[in-house]
Image (cartoon, grey):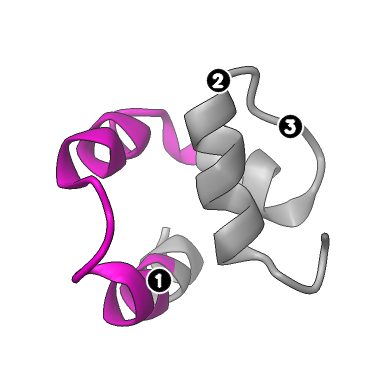
Amino acid sequence: MRELDLILARYLDDYAQTMDLGEFERFLDSTDMELYDWVTGRATPTDKSFAEIVTRLTPTRG
C-alpha cells in the first residue's frame, strides 16, 4: 500500500539510527492489512514491541 510506504519511510527517516532493525523487519513481515489496521487505530498489535512501533508511527493517536 502506497500510504503505508509513506508512513514507514517517514518512520525510518526519524528512527533508523536508533531502532532495532531485526525487530522492524519482523514488524514488516506482518500483512499490509494488519499494518494498516494498526496505523489507523482499527486494531492494536498484541506484540508489545509492535505496539511500541505503532505508537511511534502514529504519535497523534497516543
In front: mark 2 or mark 3? 2
Along the line of sight, the residue nearer the viewer: 39 or 11:
11
- Identify the element where label 1 is drawn: helix
* Marks 3 and 1 in Cβ contact (< 8 Å): no
Q: Quadrant of residue 15?
A: bottom left
- For the residue pair 35 and 45, the one nearer the viewer reads as 45
Q: Which residue type carries mark 2?
A: Asp
* Residue hosting label 1: 11
Q: Earlier in the sequence, mark 3 or mark 1?
A: 1
Sort mark 1 into few (<14), some (14-19) or many (20+) by Cα contacts within 10 Å.
some
Q: Secondary structure at mark 3?
A: loop
Find out whether residue 20 is within the magenta segment. Answer: yes
Q: What residue type is disc 1 on?
A: Tyr
- Residue 46 x/y as whole percent: 64, 18
Q: What secondary structure do most residues of the magenta stretch adopt? A: helix
Residue in the image at 80% along x and 48% along y = 41
Magenta-tinted stretch: 8-34
Is residue 31 inside the magenta stretch? yes
For image coordinates 57% across by 44% down, the residue present is: 52
Mark 2 — residue?
A: 47
Residue at the spot of label 3? 44
Tell me which residue sits at (68%, 41%) in the image: 37
